[in-house]
Amino acid sequence: MLVAFPILTALGTAVFCFLMRDQRQGQMLASLGGALIQVALAVALLWTVTTSGPLSAQMGGWPAPFGITLVADTLSALLVLSTAIVLLCVVIFSLSEIEREQERLGYQALVHALVAGVMGAFLTGDIFNLYVWFEVLLISSFGLLVIGGGKAQLDGAVKYVGLNLIATLAFLTGVGLLYGATGTLNMADLNQAVSGRMTETAILASAGFLLFAYGAKSALFPVYFWLPASYHTPAAATSALFAALLTKVGVYSILRVFTLVFETDGTPLAPVLIVAGAITAVVGVLGAVTHREIRRILSYNIISSIGLLIMAIGIDTPLAITAAIFYLVHNMLVKAALFLHAGLVLKIKGSEEFDKVGGIYEQAPWIAVLFLVPALSLAGIPPLSGFWGKFLILRATIDLPSLALTVLVLVVSLLTIYSVARIWLEIFWKSDERGEGCAPAPALMVAPIVLLTILTVGIGLYPDLLYSWSDSAAAGIADPSTYISAVMEDPS
Amino acid sequence: MKSLILSVASRALMPTLLIVSFYVLWRGHNEPGGGFIGGLVAVLGLVIMSKAEGVRAARDFLRIEPLSLAAIGLGCSVVSGVWGYIVYGTVLKGVWPFITVAADGSKSGLPVGSIFLFDLGVYLVVIGGVLGMLFAMEEVVAPEPDEDETRDGGAG
């Protein structure tokens, strides 16, 4: 039953935070307490799963495939832990950033409701429930996007809502087709039911709809435009939460559904994933080198890393899947750190545009260094976590018959370095022509960035631990028999 | 603008709809119905009231901020899930505290338990959520009537 607690904790915390939204202290304590409990639960879950195999629970005691199944394998547990860490950092940061008025509208409650959706999506063993959790996180993210809404925020939110509603509809259609063709929605059961039927029209069409839906959620080419339109508009804590979690849920769904349910070998799906991923990586990084605002650049960097991830999933060798999982976890932590840092710059300089900010290195060198470390990690400089992620993906492409993808990964990495170097030069290194000083940096904003930076350095210096988890998660994906037996032969 | 016909009709319709909504919620355990539909029927009643008497009157009738009602509802559903865990070790498993099972397997007592609590939670979430959105929109689109009246009165 440990599997159910991350979701229950998130929902319970959301209720507490909302009912106490007029009392600042109480709301802060509830939100922080909820986030700490999530981290503890996630550590316990990962510990249990890595020591004794996948864990499952049947809600209400109805056995699979009829009841609602929650299941955690190493992949889910790893992502739940990353989510919990990001949640804790975002909550700490938001205590200082979010204004009283937004808090009173239920900001903290929406953050925890969003996390309930993310945890649910990572832990569900049922494709229809995956849809439900997507809805939960979507509704919460709408709320977070428009809270305290200015015009730019509403404009971003409309694009976000528009594309996501279409994607949700496609998701539901795909699930409906799958149910019509197989008569089950439990993913472990679907693995048996779909096996050997990948040539059937209904199954292929369902796979197409689901790929479109997950592609739109993870900002895959050509349905990525909602992300750069909306991610730079809300509060930095919100955009850090989105950057770290939302697209990654889409990637997780592709990783889960297109290995456990559908077989990609010998179907058009594998080349589609590789090509779409490659184009996304290039388009994203090209966007990143042209914009002149921190969070816009980082948004395009998200798109480019999503491209690399999807490409690795499409390659679908054990090494490529390990690489994708390692890179996914690294990316969640580093993206959260960078988006939070953009919020810090906004706080101390009043802007995050190249033309208006400069000289932070002179005025506050530690703040600048605090940006440099995760930025170099994103760029893939050793000995930080990004280096190992990129290195593993590169290694996986070298095994392919053609070296085109290897060249592509190298070019994308080079341009990523250039894009973060531009932020460094323009925001931190360039002298401050306007002669304005820095406002003091609030400790509550610095602390979460320091925590995430320590994690990326730690993973970089000692990659074995995360690598072994990624490896066992990839092994669980390559051979889902333990996952399936955990769901179908649950003793409880 | 207030309509006398709507205002008079709403006095009969609103309580009727609320009673029907509770009936729909109640029968939902084994028959068509349940918290979601029941909640929507109750929303209808309150919407009619807000159209006839104004959003302020509907808010006063509700006494509690709609979104807080939704949060309380979510809390009920979470508690019902945890209740099953505490009693049987399985989240969301039905608990029937007022039912006694006789030796021959026949059951007697009041069929109210954690499942009804869950449904009640859904009922409150639907009422609170939908009304929260509707009232917010109404207050943005239509100006507060009593403010207008005082301004007109002052000008005349």
Image (cartoon, coloured by chain):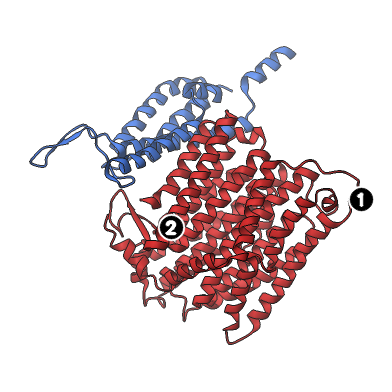
Chain colours: A red, B blue
Which of A464/A305 is in front? A464
- The image shows residue A205 at horizontal and vertical percentages of 46, 70
Q: Is residue A234 visible?
A: no
Chain bearing mark 1: A
The amino acid sitting under disc 1 is Glu
State the residue at coordinates (56%, 44%). A111
SS type, badge 1: loop
- The image shows residue A364 at horizontal and vertical percentages of 80, 48
- The image shows residue A13 at horizontal and vertical percentages of 49, 39
Let me know if marks 2 and 1 both belong to one chain: yes
State the residue at coordinates (72%, 43%). A151
Query: Which residue in the protein does label 2 denote?
Result: A47
- The image shows residue A272 at horizontal and vertical percentages of 56, 75
The amino acid sitting under disc 2 is Trp
Query: On the rendered structure, is A130 left or right of B25?
Result: right
Asked if residue A269 is positioned above or below residue A18 in the image, the reply reads below
Please say if the residues under marks 2 and 1 sit with CB atoms less than 8 Å apart: no
Q: What crowding class fits label 2: few (fewer than 14 Cα within 10 Å), some (14-19), or many (20 or more)?
A: some
**Label annotation for residue A94:** none
SS type, badge 2: helix
Q: Is residue A46 visible?
A: yes
Please name which of the two marks, 2 or 1, marks the residue nearer to the observer. 2
Q: Residues under labels 2 and 1: Cα distance?
A: 52 Å
**Label annotation for residue A433:** 1
State the residue at coordinates (27%, 39%). B95
Query: On the rendered structure, is B3 left or right of B78?
Result: right
Which of A336/A224 is in front? A336
